[in-house]
Image (spheres, coloured by chain):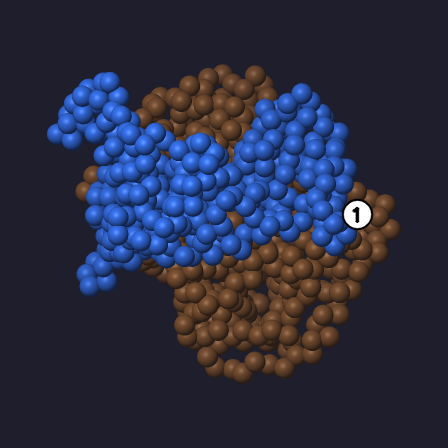
Chain colours: A brown, B blue
Amino acid sequence: MLQHDVVIVGSGLAGMSAALEICGQLDVAIISKVYPTRSHSGAAQGGIAASLGNSEPDSQEEHMYDTVKGSDFLGDQDAIEMFTRDAPEIIYQLEHMGCVFSRTGEGKIAQRAFGGHSHPRACYAADRTGHAILHVLYEQVMKQGKRISIYPEWYLMSLIIRDNVCRGIVIYDIRSGNFEVIRAKGVIFATGGYGRAYRITSNAFANTGDGIIAAFNAGVPLEDMEFVQFHPTGLFGQGILVSEAARGEGGYLINGKGERFMEKYAPAKMELAPRDIVSRSEQREIDEGRGIDGKDYIYLDLRHLGKEKIMERLPQVRQLGIDFIGMDCITDPLPIQPTAHYSMGGIPTDKDGHVIIDDKGTQLTGFFAAGECACVSVHGANRLGTNSLLDAVVFGKRTGIAALKFAKGPRLSDMKEDEVLAPVKERISAVFSSPGTESINDIRDELKENMMSNCGVFREKEGLNKGLEKVKELRERYKNGKITDKSKLFNNELIEVLELGHMLEFSEIIFKGAIAREESRGAHSRTDFPKRDDRNWLKHTLAYLTEDGIELKYKPVTITKYQPEERKY
Amino acid sequence: MIFSIQRFNPEKDTSPYFQDYEFEIPKSATLLDCMNLIKWTQDGTLTHRMSCRSAICGSCAVKVNGHTLLACKTQASKVIKDGKVKIEPMGNMEIIKDLVVDFGQFWEKIERIKPWLVPDESEKPEKERYQSIDDFRKIDAGSTCIMCASCYSDCCSLDVDKGFLGPTSLAKAQRFIHDSRDRERLSRTGEISDKGGIWDCTHCGECSERCPTEAKPLERITSLRRTAIALGITNNIGARHVKAFVDSIAHSGRLNENILPIRSMGLFNISGLMSLIPIGIRMMMRRKNPPIIHKPIDEAEDVRRIFRKLRKG
């Protein structure tokens, strides 16, 4: 059995930010299913928000209001206030660490416009902002040397909670096939989002919700899981991300009739309305036959920006178009479609990353979460672009500080290794001893198609119910899934089987939450309940695992400064 | 189409072997799409790394028809030759299983160049440190590296000298050495001018050829060499070699191969000079030695004029 004072699962922006607060004072470890620089934070392109006011006057209050409004008033305003207040300081810290940022003529950090933000607020490094921050944080981790232990390519198997106290985790070494138990005073999950269950997605193969499901199965509720953001500009075919920066820099969205159709849906903000609204507008155009040649995509047209601006500000976007669909955005419009992108829901936490298990603010001792896997909630029903990198760094840091403070106190609790290993080993042997009559690939494909068609940009009762039944059927078939690789060494077929299990589990929770929520708010859009219903639904969903399956409860939204109002752009 | 993929599971195999998979490439599929479909529909034991599938995480580099590239950003149809494509694990690294290699040494070499900014701590501004657009451009390309190791895999110098830092580390070093915010330019440049550093690159260009980003290591290495000379860090074989090379051409329009190794080693480097003797003898025995008397080319005066003009400008 291994031990650390604090163990962090996930090596993206949130996980590394937390580790950097703890190292040198307590023994801290980072566990990651990939090597740290492979984490999906690196795929974020357009920017990180902060009201620096480097290109025009801006304020924390406006950043807060934009975020509240963007969240369709489901965001908790105390958390949003703190989040937007911490933002400038965090950007300066990253810059002092050596983060590469594009610059203004004066040499300040450059800022560009982004959807739903009332001023140019996105600090950026060309269109590789996540990559720049991920690498600068990893540089700082390397600088700490042995003060941060890293377990690269280790996979989280379970979270150990006894008597409402978190005791540690069980992990699996992908390279050797061995299990280890890590005892810890504090455990931080920074395991990312759950968009991989959708056929069209911008997410990495790694984004399979392993952390949230480990927490859920250990008795932790999950909050607002029905809110899955669709990004308006996924490259047609697979949904590979084309940064919102493309529209921030002035790109147009064009339908099959050659119209800038956003005129109809958000006349003031046009292409720079928040993502939920733009994705819905695109989907409506496509559904009503106004896609390009009547097909299921529309155009993102950047040609009028000119070669120079594209090469300077959007080099990666251009390269992605060339590599993945053979189109150069300097000369051709890019075919795009909405793509599953960001998970607003996740493990409920307070402003310092403490995991909260009910509507009364009860903490789960020693368990923390930060970044996309957490639900604070600063994004509510719809996240604004560039607020996710900020979320990961701000809450990663705050959670690191809170976990450090906490873990200085208690002693490591005793644990029987065999007892916590037994259920994990049982699970693995069940996978290996399955009758093998079902193809894992078929089940995964059917799940992804089911999520797209029944729980996508638009939802309605009949489809949701059908979709839920389908997930239940797939969960049964999954028990008979076939695995061919029986070796211990680097068995990533086994990992894929486990990941699919997690995707099936959280998909059921998404459906349950979506069926219950009879309103349209942010990314959750019900065609049978097209209006937001503040009287009945201005509340967060909490999904619990009970003996009878998933049970839904609710908790109120924290409203401080801004009363809900109609959301217009 | 035939996908001929190198397999190796040390649990049961004594050495790597090729396995052929017959597979029809779906329309506009990437190489990674194909490898995944082969794994998911034909052989679940086939093992490779991947994550973002949008060319930013750096997980999926493999050798394709002998050259390393990112499987996710490569159209499969473009690498098929005569109905076949050969896929192998990256080079210069140990194989763990199939196409998965051990990055241990790769990361050790990254850590060796002190890969973090060392700013001037005496003045810590309240806000950001200012950096001009021109200064940003000096580090922009180098900082786009995704650590995929494509350059490392195909590096010829590494192939013969495991002590070489390698293109990735040197490109990473450039990103700090040319960062207007870093205070250790001189010591950093000194360290990478030693053995295993910038002068051990043979500038074959494979690294920049394979690089899937704008990092292009050879360009970074070249700019570091210029910096080293400009900073006067010339007391090493590499810098002396460059100087002797240039002097020889400037003088006679042709390389004096008798003098070059001696001047590269350094006139007072006795043990270094001694080490040249057996090489010289072997060359003579095989009649590979250059003429004893070095003759300038006929147009040597033209070359000298070019040099004079260059040095003035």
Give the secondary structure at mark 1.
loop
Between B10 and A254, the one nearer to me in the picture: B10
Q: Residues within 10 Å of mark 1 (few under 14, many from 20)?
A: few
> Residue B31 is drawn in which quadrant?
top right
Let me know if residue B178 appears in the view. no
Instruction: Report the number of numbered marks.
Output: 1
The residue lying furthest to the front in this view is B285
Identify the residue at image location x=58%, y=67%: A357
Q: Residue at x 73, y 75 (%)?
A: A418
Q: Which chain is mark 1 on?
A: A
Residue A199: x %, y % from top left: 64, 38
* Image quadrant where one finds the C terminus of chain A: top left
Give how far across and how far down residue B38 sits, in percent.
72, 36
Q: Position of residue B301 (x, y in %)?
A: 18, 21
Q: Which image quarter: residue A450?
A: top right
* Position of the N terminus of chain A by quadrant: bottom right
Disc 1 designates what residue? A484
Q: Which amino acid, by three-letter code, is at mark 1? A: Thr
